[in-house]
């Protein structure tokens, strides 16, 4: 079952989800919905949340420990923490400027990712579990840098979210075939070796704020948006790459259940959740594929 709890302060919300199921199908646990009983204490906070009190320590970690005591812990139990910052104050700033002339892009992203990753020990442990899970299924060399694989949407800041999100554990299997496709496209030279990932999993709230489709595959952690920095501003190279992607999609895409979105900005959408193509206005007729 799923449980939701929140710790509220004047300007931020932190929430955990506790999932427990008796069976797992293809990495997806069977679960229902349940909610923590609202606090009955008289507080200035909104109803429908659980307020923790006490001194010392991380109150979110205390809430996680509390829920572990309330549920019988077994191997099918996972706890996820999400944090959304309400934008009535300044949110943490992250450098998301893309640079194609030097390594500053990777250095800044790596530094900010490590800051996010080590903000609490539970998150770091879950991310390590995710990396081990993917390595066991696609091979360690085919797992992209986590600083790319956990990116969300470029509008994370204005939407009041963080630049990285770890998908819920029951969705981890969804990215595996897409990673395998991504690796194949790079190994065949269709995508250059320096192709970068800039959006994968988006929680429903962030996807809605970022203008994503209501049925976006990003919400199920099965899609990725990529780009090639060296082709930015070079229409000829970009067009050649798009032609190669279209040819692969035509002759091999059905076997991969390949969903291919090509945009005028140079962004590319990949998923393995339906054999289809699109481009301008998310319409098949708007795809630059001429096949």
Image (cartoon, rainbow, N blue to C red):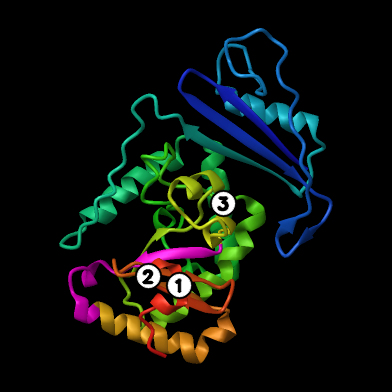
Packing grade of label 1 (10 A; few <14, some 14-19, many >=20) is few
Q: Quadrant of the N terminus?
A: top right
Quarter of the image where one finds residue 244: bottom left
Extreme-left residue of the structure = 101
Packing grade of label 3 (10 A; few <14, some 14-19, many >=20) is many
The residue drawn where x is 61% and y is 12% is: 54
Label 3: which residue? 167
Task: Point out the tag, 3 or 2, that comes first from the N-terminus.
Answer: 3
The residue drawn where x is 63% and y is 18% is: 51
| Mark 3 or 2: the one toward you | 2
Q: Which residues are magenta?
A: 222-237
Quarter of the image where one finds residue 146: bottom left
The residue drawn where x is 65% and y is 26% is: 63
Extreme-top residue of the structure = 42
Residue 82 horizontal/vertical position (percent): 55, 38
| Mark 3 or 1: the one toward you | 1
Q: Which mark is residue 283?
A: 1
- 283 drawn magenta: no
Marks 3 and 1 sit apart, C-alpha to C-alpha, by 28 Å
Q: Quadrant of the C terminus?
A: bottom left
Task: Point out the tag, 3 or 1, that comes first from the N-terminus.
Answer: 3
Frontmost residue, 286 versus 191 = 286
Relative horizontal placement of residue 279, taking residue 274 as reference (left or right): left
Relative horizontal placement of residue 211, taking residue 237 as reference (left or right): right
Q: How many marks?
A: 3
Residue 186 horizontal/vertical position (percent): 39, 78
Relative horizontal placement of residue 138, taking residue 33 as reference (left or right): left
Circles 2, 1 touching at the beta carbon (< 8 Å): yes
Indicate whether 130 appears above or below 185.
Answer: above
Label 2: which residue? 280
Q: Which mark is residue 132?
A: none
Q: Secondary structure at mark 1?
A: loop
């Amino acid at each position: 079952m799923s449980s939701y709890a929140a710790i509220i302060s004047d300007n931020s919300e932190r929430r955990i989800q506790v999932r427990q199921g008796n069976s797992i199908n293809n990495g997806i646990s069977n679960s229902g919905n349940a909610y923590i009983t609202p606090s009955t204490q008289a507080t200035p906070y909104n109803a429908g949340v659980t307020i923790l009190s006490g001194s010392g320590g991380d109150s979110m970690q205390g809430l996680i420990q509390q829920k572990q005591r309330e549920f019988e812990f077994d191997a099918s139990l996972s706890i996820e923490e999400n944090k959304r910052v309400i934008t009535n104050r300044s949110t943490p700033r992250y450098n998301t400027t893309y640079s194609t002339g030097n390594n500053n892009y990777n250095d800044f992203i790596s530094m900010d990712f490590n800051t996010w990753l080590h903000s609490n020990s539970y998150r770091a442990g879950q991310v390590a579990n995710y990396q081990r899970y993917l390595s066991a299924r696609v091979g360690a060399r085919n797992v992209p840098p986590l600083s790319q694989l956990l990116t969300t949407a470029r509008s994370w800041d204005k939407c009041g979210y963080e630049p990285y999100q770890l998908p819920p554990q029951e969705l981890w299997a969804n990215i595996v075939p897409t990673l395998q496709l991504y690796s194949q496209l790079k190994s065949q030279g269709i995508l250059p070796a320096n192709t970068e990932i800039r959006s994968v999993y988006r929680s429903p709230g962030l996807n809605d704020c970022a203008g994503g489709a209501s049925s976006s595959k990003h919400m199920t952690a099965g899609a990725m948006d990529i780009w090639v920095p060296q082709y930015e501003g070079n229409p000829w190279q970009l067009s050649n790459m798009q032609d190669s992607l279209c040819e692969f999609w035509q002759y091999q895409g059905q076997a991969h259940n390949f969903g291919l979105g090509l945009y005028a900005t140079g962004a590319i959408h990949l998923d393995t959740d339906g054999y289809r193509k699109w481009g301008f206005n998310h319409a098949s007729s708007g795809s630059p594929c001429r096949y």
